Each structure stands twice: as structure tokens, then as C-alpha cells.
Image (cartoon, grey):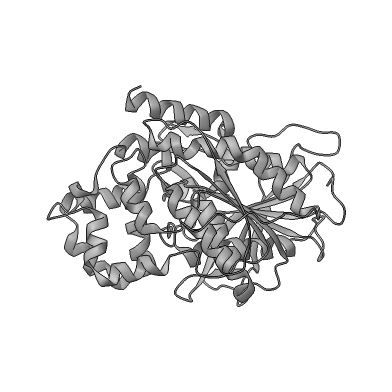
Amino acid sequence: MSVRTRIFSVLLALTLTGGAAAAATPAHAATSRGVTIPAFYTPPADLPADDGTLIRRETLPLALSLPGITGPLPGRATRIMYKSTDSGGRPVAVTGAYVEPAARWWGTGPRPLVVLAPGTMGQGDQCSTSLALQRGLVLGLGNQTTVSIGYEVLAMYRLLAKGIAVVTTDYIGLGTPDRLHTYVNRVDGGHAVLDAARAARALPGTSLTAASAVGLYGYSQGGGAVASAAELQSSYAPDVPLKATYAGAPPADLAAVTAAIDGSELAGALGWSVNGFVQSSPSLRPLVDRYLSDAGRAAMADLSTMCVGDAIFGYAGKRSTGWTRNGESMAAVIAAEPDLRAYIDAQLIGTRKPSGVVRVATGVNDDLVTHAQARTMAAAWCGLGGAVVYAPVSLAKTSSKLLNHFGPLLADQGPAVDWLAGRLAGKPAPANCPAVS
């Protein structure tokens, strides 16, 4: 199977699990690769003091929705903007979406809430999950030159079908045009997740109560974000009653993941990482510029506007050696520079005991967001006294790193949703720690 055929197969699979027709949007504030970004996404000049505070909200029309007797199915959606704090301690506005399910909660107690942290969506503002819920798959419509894939809709709708309320975060800088998305930044991702829970619990007119349990769900980038959130909850958001977390294929060790992604179908994610490094730590800009060639700087600028589909089509198989002046790989540059190593080391997940019980699932043949580093995170949590359920996913290995990574997402999604629902319903979850290798 050719690389192009494999790419098409992945995009087709993602389309079937999350694609839909484009929907109308209100007046815009900006455009990205020909896509209109609604004015809603532009943050106000002044932000509230408290993290998780709602800044604004509006009705969000879902692209995949059916009429029901008492309202739309699978539920009523609200686009939200809320306040968070980034890794530098700076206030920031984050967008997302809350969906009030039409289905009744089948468990005991009040309706629970799950924060869904999306997997890799890209870095262009048009790639945000809340826009994907409204627009679905956008592929060359009119003057739009982007491929935005709303593949997280399947997990969301599975949770809604069980009567679980869902809030999803767009992450810091994804959707809001005031800054670049800080891709795989540990603190930014964890804060955005926890503050989304706070914002949803404060949203008026929902069926959530103060006693509603909170769960977290994420795969790939989302798996890292919820894993970080589970570590940070006790110190950053003790008011969020976190009960359980599903962390699928978390990029816990960025040094290992950077080396694995280079030259793969998702090589563009390296550009998002570098752009995110500089957004989070502007002092790194001169150092990064010293290594990037003209071609590298052009690639970083190009990728900063791209969604995951764009990056697959435009950068699959590219190697970072083509982006540096001396032909060194990004991994080699990071290893050679103490400041870059320090930044990467600060992103490591697995050094703090997580709150609640965590199910860590990773494909044993995942060679993109590598299995070994995720398993090491789970073992480290166990060593810290964390309640961990380790779930290796065994699928046949293919010649495509992207398929080896996305296959477990689909294969394990049903069991993961069922496991999380069970924990939110109060069912016990015996720990199952991996042996330390």
C-alpha cells in the first residue's frame, strides 16, 4: 500500500467517524486558510480574575444532529469561552463547547460531566474542535484550502448516548486568534482541561449539580492533556471533583515522541511543537532561529496555519533535517541545547501522583506516540501510589506509523467509554499496574 493510499484510508476512516457538511457561521473576526473564524473567538481586552470563569457563551448548531421529541439529538450544544492561566502564569481566554445530552443518565446520582480533550487537530484557528462540531469535515469548499477533521465526535456522541454531559476544550491558542496554539505543552493542556470543567459546572441552565462527578477523556494529544490534568488537579483545581481519567496514547515523554514522529506521516507535528515552544517561551526564539534554515522557517510558518489533514497531505514523510541549517534533526538539536532540553524535560508527565483512578491505554505496536514511553508513565504513577489501570491494546503492526497510532483509538474507544462511565457510576476499578521494565 502506497503512502498516499494509506493517508487516504486514514482520512476516510476519520471522515466516517466525524465528518459532516459545513454549517453557517456568524459574522467573522478573521480568516485562516480561507475559513471564516467567527467573532466569538476573539478574546476581550480584559479577562476575569478567576480560572474557569465563563467569559461568553452562545448556541452552537451541531453539524451532526437529529430532531427529537423534546429537543435535538444527541443534545443541545453551547459554544463557550472561559478564562485560564498558561504555563507562564499569564491569563488567557480559551474556547470550547458544552453539550447537554438528550439521553437520561443511566447511573445513580446526578448527571456526571466528562471533559473531552481532543487529539491532534492542528495549529490553525480553523482547526478547533468547537468549530469542527459545527462545520464537520471542511475539504476545499469555495475558497477554503484546509482539511479540518472533526474525528472526536464519535467519542463525544458515545458519552452523550449514556447520558453523560460533555465539555470539550479547544486548548490554549487554538481558535482564538490572539496567539498560536501551544501544542503538547503540559501545563497549558492540563489547565485548559481543568478550567473547562469549571466553566461547564458554572454554565447556567444545565442539569449538572455541585455533586456531579467529573471524568476526563483523551487520546494522543488529548491523552497527554488529561494525564497532565490528573497530575495538576490537586494543586491547580481542587474544587473539580475528579473521579476518573482515560488517558489513551499519551505523549508523556516528548523527547521520545519527537524522534519517532520525524519522517512519519505526521511529521508536521514537529513544526507545531516548535511553534508552541516559542509561543510559550519567547526567549527560545533566537535559539530556534539560529538552527532553522530558510526552508525551516517557511515550513514553521506554513504549518502554523494548518490542520491535521493539511499537514498529512503537505508534510507526510518529511524529515526535520531538511529544516535546519546544518542538516541536524530536531531531536539532535534538542539534545545539544540545554535550554531546549530543559523545556522538553519540563513537559514530562509521570512525575506527580494523579488524582482519581486513571486508565492508561496504549497500542503495543504504536511507533508514533510510542508505546514504551506511555507504559513508563503508567509504571511511574504506580510507583508514586497512583490508582492506575493499564490496558495494552494489541493490534497487528502495519508499515504505517499513523495507522499504528490511530488503530488503537478506534479499537479501544468503546471499552474506554464504558470503563469511564462505570467509574462515574460508582463501580470499582481494581488497579492493574504494569511491571517496571
Residue sitting at x 64%, y 52%: 97
Q: Quadrant of residue 198?
A: bottom right
Question: In the depicted view, which residue is nearer to us: 115 or 175?
Answer: 115
Work out whether 308 lies above or below 30.
above
The location of residue 146, given as percent across then percent down, is: 41, 38
* 245 in relation to 394, above or below: below
Q: Where on the picture, by quarter, is residue 330?
A: bottom left
Front residue of 311 and 53: 311
Q: Is residue 419 visible?
A: yes
Q: Is residue 61 visible?
A: no
Q: Which residue is depicted at the point 41% across and 47% down?
A: 32
Q: In this view, does 164 lie to the left or right of 343?
A: right
Residue 313, image x, y percentages: 34, 34
Which corner quadrant holds the N terminus? Answer: top left
Indicate left or right for 231 with 106 as reference: left
- Numbered circles on residues, count: 0
Q: Residue 214 at x, y = what percent?
A: 72, 59
Q: Report the residue at 16% width, 52% height from top.
A: 294
| Residue 65 drawn above or below residue 331 | above
Task: Give the side of residue 185 with respect to residue 205, left or right.
Answer: left
The residue furthest left is 326
Image coordinates of residue 260 in percent, x first then y, are 34, 47
